[in-house]
Structure formats: structure tokens, C-alpha cells
Image (cartoon, coloured by chain):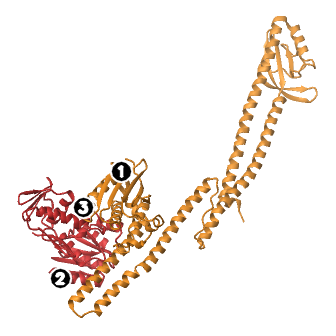
């Protein structure tokens, strides 16, 4: 996919651009606020990585002007400011996701993949189907190959997140943010514990194949 | 040098005295007008009664009796102080000693000749009697005037006294206010020049000045605490980050000096990566605690349903704790709400749960209780593990505090420190008690009314 990388720190920009190109994405770098603002308006991207603090016009202002100009491209904001108020102001300005430096590249890549515009119909879908697993969000009912599976609310939320991003990586912090609403790392294994329970319920007693892959050090992925 | 009118204290005191003096003047004027009117009214009533008596004696007994009655009343022994004159149709005075010309009927002020003092004026009631006679009853106005003069001089003296007392009191009060304020400004100047431990004196009276001193002291304590916090963070960063940084360096060095194989390099780099992640985690924790202690998070406080939050966290953590070989039981009272930050409260509870499972042996029972009374909510995490010795209980809430018994367990010694910071930013406190056996940590927070 086409990525606009607006980041003034040459080292960070270098390693992010390198990593994204390795994954086969097309990266357009911008090192100053004015350049990023201009590129974001005249060219079309699938996602934008925007550093919050840039020379010239800062990231928040660039984002505000894009949104005012009708640019709806998903934006992931990068920042060295990890405070609660900082995150709120970034999201208020119109960011779709927020990642605090320093970050692992795998985390950034997973979040960018998740941000990429999905077909609009799936955004509001109340029925999800991946492989032989079907999830009815209204009835809060899960079936695998016709067999009903009883899940706890958290397990259901984990499954929904994985199914909505089927084929893509969901990281530990994405689970914490979207299932628990935690923007901090509680340094515990709740994600792992709940995932392991979810997996054993999905596999059932008859030992059906595990639909969830573990990518060590990166996250989890539902086989599409 | 004190300039009395440059000082708010003196200005207030003088204004107060002036207002008091003005009140005396107003009071004096009202008393004067009212008393004068009343006295004159009484004088008129006296004249009317006298006239009615004489007129009655004329109608009943005739002119001779009237003249006799006037003569009797004019006796020097008489004390009523009235003067009389009876005029006939031609204007000639036929009875009475009052030397005046015939006035018109009704009340009026008439000139007369006082046998001792010469020309004078008097208040008179003139009445026409049958037969063309005209009776004048008069009283010297000097009585009224003397009375008025007495009132005026009394109030004049009172006014003078009030002004003198007012000035005296104003000087005393102004001086007092200045002295009280000086007792606050002297420490403030000392603090400015660097004596940061100085505090405002508070007297036993608990008056407004003491309230102000208490408020200022609370503010100074808070500032001192923040400064202390800043110093502490700097020294923590300097001292406690050295160890993990040195370890990271050692791992990188070992990888370079080790066997020259890709696999060995990868192992060394992975270790270094884990180590640097731990360091970054430590930084994040320090910064987060500083952010909380700074208090800016209060701006985003909202109503938090603690019952929901605790129930939710218990549901999330019970499986993980069970997998670790301990049990979690939760007892949550309904309808507990407070004003706060959901994530911070969650993090505090998670840290307490974390401590309860990392510093206890398998098989430990962990209980979480949320309860409340009218003004507070209490969130308690207790276990029946080995507990903490009483002398260590205060110490474990400090930054980087780790007991020797926990050296081998993961963690950076900031968990309880964050819990304390979260409790304090919510206006609450943390207490650590013996759970007999085990440890009991309680966060007491202000409750939000339903």
C-alpha cells in the first residue's frame, strides 16, 4: 500500500521506511510539516504516519488542516509524548491511532495494516464469517462448523477483533486498547490468558485445528 | 516608614471610623429635630390648656373674675412661666402684665418687653372672647432654645469623642493588621531568598489570618513535595537506571566478544533487546508516576463506576491468576462511584493484583473488596501469603523500594509507588495492614454522591 511517512527524525524515518519497503509498501517520505501538508492533499495514500512534533507546522496542525480540507486518509500519529492529555489531544485532532515512541516496528506495521480502509460494508457488519467460524454480534453467538461455542464477553471481544482483522496481525497492545480500553501496558498476561481460553474453546473437545496463529514477539493472526 | 494612607489596613480603619462619626452626626440631627418638634408641640398644648381655663372662667364668672385669675397666675410665686394680656375692643390692655401689642388670633410668635431683659420674643396663643375681648397667653421661647442648645452641645461632645476614639482605634487596628500581615510577608521573603523550609506562623486563634497562613502552608508543602518529587526522579534516573544500563552494555559486549557466529550474535542481540525493553518500561513507569503526581490528569477526571470497573477487572484477571496457581475472589458493593480516571484506577488495581500474585507462593487466596460509606469508597486487595514486616510497610510504597525477599521476582519496584500516586491524585490515601496472615492494601478514595 501507499504510505506517507511524515517524520523529521532521519533515523526513525530511515528505519520505518526501510521496514515498510521490506514489507512491499510504497513509502513517500516528508521531513517537514509544510511538505507533509502539501503531499497529503495533492497525492492519494492508503495510510499516513504523522509525527506529532515536526519543524514548521506541527503534526497536530497538519492533521487539522488535512481534515478541514477533506482528506479522510487514516492517520497514525507518532509521538514522544506519552501523557494522557497528549493522547487525547491527538485523537481530538482527528488521528485514527496513536503510537508512543519508542515503538517496535512490528507494532507499527500491524497497526498500519489494521488502519488501511476496509470495504465499508464490514465496518457495520453484525455478522462475521472467517473460515468455518461465524460470529453474530447481535445475538452474541459464535458457531464453528455449525457447533455453538459459549464465550465470555471478553473472549467474544477478542474473537471479534481477530475476525475483523482476519489475515492481519493484531498486537498485544491493540488487544489491550480495544478490548480493555487500557492505553498502558499492565505488565501482566491477561491477553495471553484470555486468548489461550478462547483458543481451547474454539478447538473444542474434538481437536479442530487452531484458527489463530501466534507470531512470536509480534502478535496474533486469524487465518483468513 | 509607614504612610497611613498608603496602607490598606489604615485606610480600612480610618474609613470605618469616619463612617461611625457620620452615624453620630446623623443620629444627633434626628434627635435634635424630633426633640425640638416635640418640645414645641408640648409648649403649644400648655398654652391651649391655659387659654381654655381662662376662657372658661370668663364665660362662667365674667370679666372681673378673669382679670383676677390672670392676676393670681401672674404672682411671682407662680411657676408656670406664662405671661398674660387681655385687650378690649379698642386694643387697650385691660388685664395682664405682658407688655405687647394686640396680636392677631391664633398661634404665633410675638415681640414683648421683658421687665428684666428688655425686648424679647415669645410663643403666644391669641383667642377672641365674647364681648370683644382678646386674650393672649404667651411663653418665652428661651426654654426651647436652651433645650436645643443642650442637645446640640451633647452631640457635639459625643462627635468629638467618637472622632478621637475613631482615630485612636484606627491607628491601633491598622497597626495590628500591618503586624499580622508582616508576619506572613516576612516568611514569604525568606522563602524567596532560598529558605524553602520556612512556613507561615499559625496562632491558636484560628482567625482569617491563620486560615490564610494554613492555606499558604498547604500550598508551600505541595510545592515542596513537587520539587522533592522532581529531585527524586532525577536521582532515581541517575542511580537506578545505571544498573540495567550497565547490564545492557555487558550483554552487548559479551555478544561482540563471544563466538563470531550469526546465531550467537542473534542470541546476544535478542537479550539486549529484552533488556532495553525493560529499560524503556522503567522509563515509562517513572514518567507516568511523575505525570500522575503532577496532577494534570485531574483535568480529564470523569464519573467512574467503581463497581463496574472492579467487577470487570476481576473477570479479566481471575483466569490469569488461576493459571498462576492462586485464587481470586471479589466482593463488590453496588453503586460505588467516584470522580477519577478509569485507566489510572485500573492500573492501580492491576498493580495490587500483580503484587499479590508475584510476592506470594502458589495456593495463595487473593481477595478484592470494594465497599463504601457515605463519603468514601474503599478498594482492598488482600492475600494470605507471607505478608510484609511492620517496619517495611511504609518503605515499600517508595520509588524503587524492593525488599530483599523479592529480589528474585520480576518488577522494578514502582508498582505500589504508582498505587500511592493514583490514590493521592484522586484525593485519597493508601494504607498497608496485616491481613493475619498476609498483606492487605487499602485505597481509600472520596466517594461521588449518587
Residue B321 rendering spot, x and y as whole percentages: 27, 63
Residue A16 rendering spot, x and y as whole percentages: 23, 81
The chain shown in orange is which?
B
Other residues around mark 1 within 10 Å, as few (<14) / some (14–19) / many (≥20): many
In the displayed structure, A3 sits above or below B100; it is below
Query: For the point 44% across and 76% down, which residue is it?
Result: B236
Residue carrying label 3: B319
The hue used for chain A is: red
B313 and B404: which is toward the camera: B404
Other residues around mark 3 within 10 Å, as few (<14) / some (14–19) / many (≥20): some
Q: Chain of mark 3?
A: B
Determine whether label 2 and label 1 are within 8 Å by CB. no
Query: For the point 69% across and 56% down, which residue is it?
Result: B176
Q: Which mark is residue B390?
A: none
Residue carrying label 2: A21
In the displayed structure, B157 sits above or below A93; it is above
A123 sits left or right of B66 in the view: left
In whole angstroms, how far apart are the C-alphas of marks 2 and 1?
52 Å
B305 sits left or right of B117 in the view: left
In whole angstroms, how far apart are the C-alphas of marks 3 and 2?
41 Å
Quadrant of image for the N terminus of chain B: bottom right
Other residues around mark 2 within 10 Å, as few (<14) / some (14–19) / many (≥20): some
Q: Which mark is residue B336?
A: 1
Q: Chain of mark 1?
A: B
Q: Are marks 2 and 1 on the same chain?
A: no
Amino acid at each position: 500500500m501507499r504510505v506517507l511517512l511524515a517524520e523529521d527524525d532521519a533515523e526513525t524515518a530511515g528505519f520505518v521506511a526501510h521496514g515498510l519497503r521490506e514489507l512491499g509498501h510504497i513509502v513517500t517520505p516528508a521531513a517537514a510539516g509544510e511538505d507533509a501538508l502539501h503531499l497529503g492533499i495533492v497525492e492519494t495514500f492508503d495510510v499516513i504516519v504523522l509525527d506529532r512534533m515536526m519543524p514548521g507546522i506541527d503534526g497536530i496542525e497538519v492533521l487539522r488542516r488535512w481534515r478541514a480540507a477533506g482528506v479522510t486518509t487514516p492517520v497514525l500519529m507518532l509521538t514522544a509524548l506519552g501523557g494522557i492529555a497528549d493522547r487525547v489531544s491527538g485523537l481530538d485532532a482527528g488521528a485514527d491511532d496513536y503510537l508512543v515512541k519508542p515503538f517496535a516496528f512490528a507494532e507499527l506495521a500491524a497497526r498500519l495494516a489494521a488502519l488501511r480502509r476496509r470495504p465499508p460494508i464490514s465496518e457495520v457488519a453484525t455478522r462475521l464469517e472467517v473460515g468455518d467460524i461465524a460470529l453474530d454480534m447481535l445475538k452474541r453467538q459464535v458457531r464453528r462448523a455449525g457447533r455453538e461455542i459459549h464465550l465470555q464477553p471478553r473472549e467474544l471481544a477478542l474473537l471479534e477483533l481477530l475476525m475483523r482483522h482476519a489475515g492481519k496481525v493484531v498486537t498485544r497492545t491493540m488487544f489491550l486498547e480495544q478490548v480493555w480500553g487500557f492505553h498502558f501496558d499492565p505488565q501482566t498476561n491477561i491477553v495471553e490468558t484470555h486468548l489461550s481460553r478462547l483458543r481451547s474453546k474454539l478447538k473444542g473437545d474434538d481437536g479442530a485445528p487452531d484458527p489463530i496463529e501466534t507470531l512470536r514477539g509480534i502478535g496474533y493472526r486469524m487465518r483468513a | 516608614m509607614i504612610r497611613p494612607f498608603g496602607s490598606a489596613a489604615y485606610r480600612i480603619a480610618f474609613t470605618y471610623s469616619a463612617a461611625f462619626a457620620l452615624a453620630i452626626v446623623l443620629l444627633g440631627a434626628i434627635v435634635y429635630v424630633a426633640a425640638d418638634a416635640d418640645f414645641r408641640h408640648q409648649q403649644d398644648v400648655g398654652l391651649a390648656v391655659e387659654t381654655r381655663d381662662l376662657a372658661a372662667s370668663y364665660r362662667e364668672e365674667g370679666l372681673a373674675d378673669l382679670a383676677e385669675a390672670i392676676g393670681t397666675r401672674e404672682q411671682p410665686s407662680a411657676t408656670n412661666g406664662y405671661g398674660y394680656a387681655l385687650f378690649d375692643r379698642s386694643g387697650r390692655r385691660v388685664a395682664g402684665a405682658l407688655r405687647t401689642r394686640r396680636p392677631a388670633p391664633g398661634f404665633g410668635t410675638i415681640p414683648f418687653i421683658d421687665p428684666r431683659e428688655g425686648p424679647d420674643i415669645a410663643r403666644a396663643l391669641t383667642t377672641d372672647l365674647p364681648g370683644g375681648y382678646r386674650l393672649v397667653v404667651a411663653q418665652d421661647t428661651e426654654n426651647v432654645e436652651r433645650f436645643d442648645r443642650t442637645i446640640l452641645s451633647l452631640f457635639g461632645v459625643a462627635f468629638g469623642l467618637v472622632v478621637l476614639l475613631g482615630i485612636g482605634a484606627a491607628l491601633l487596628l491598622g497597626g495590628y493588621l500591618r503586624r499580622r500581615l508582616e508576619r506572613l510577608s516576612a516568611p514569604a521573603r525568606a522563602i524567596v531568598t532560598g529558605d524553602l523550609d520556612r512556613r507561615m506562623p499559625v496562632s491558636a486563634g484560628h482567625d482569617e489570618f491563620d486560615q490564610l497562613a494554613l492555606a499558604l502552608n498547604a500550598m508551600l508543602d505541595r510545592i515542596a513535595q513537587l520539587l522533592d518529587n522532581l529531585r527524586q526522579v532525577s536521582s532515581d534516573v541517575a542511580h537506578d537506571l545505571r544498573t540495567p544500563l550497565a547490564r545492557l552494555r555487558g550483554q552487548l559486549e559479551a555478544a561482540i566478544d563471544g563466538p563470531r557466529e550469526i546465531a550467537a550474535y542473534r542470541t546476544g542481540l535478542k537479550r539486549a533487546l529484552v533488556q532495553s525493553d525493560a529499560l524503556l518500561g522503567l522509563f515509562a513507569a517513572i514518567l507516568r508516576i511523575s505525570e500522575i503526581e503532577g496532577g494534570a490528569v485531574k483535568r480529564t477526571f470523569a464519573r467512574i463506576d467503581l463497581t463496574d470497573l472492579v467487577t470487570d477487572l476481576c473477570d479479566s484477571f481471575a483466569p490469569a491468576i488461576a493459571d498462576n496457581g492462586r485464587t481470586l475472589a471479589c466482593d463488590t458493593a453496588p453503586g460505588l462511584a467516584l470522580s477519577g480516571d478509569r485507566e489510572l484506577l485500573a492500573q492501580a488495581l492491576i498493580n495490587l493484583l500483580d503484587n499479590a500474585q508475584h510476592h506470594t507462593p502458589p495456593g495463595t487466596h487473593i481477595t478484592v473488596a470494594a465497599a463504601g460509606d457515605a463519603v468514601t469508597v474503599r478498594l482492598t486487595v488482600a492475600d494470605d501469603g507471607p505478608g510484609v514486616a511492620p517496619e517495611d510497610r511504609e518503605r515499600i510504597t517508595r520509588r524503587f523500594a524492593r525488599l530483599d525477599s523479592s529480589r528474585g521476582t520480576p518488577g522494578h519496584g514502582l508498582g505500589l509507588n504508582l498505587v500511592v500516586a493514583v490514590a493521592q491524585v484522586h484525593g485519597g490515601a493508601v494504607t498497608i495492614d496485616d491481613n493475619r496472615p498476609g498483606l492487605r492494601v487499602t485505597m481509600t478514595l472520596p466517594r461521588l454522591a449518587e
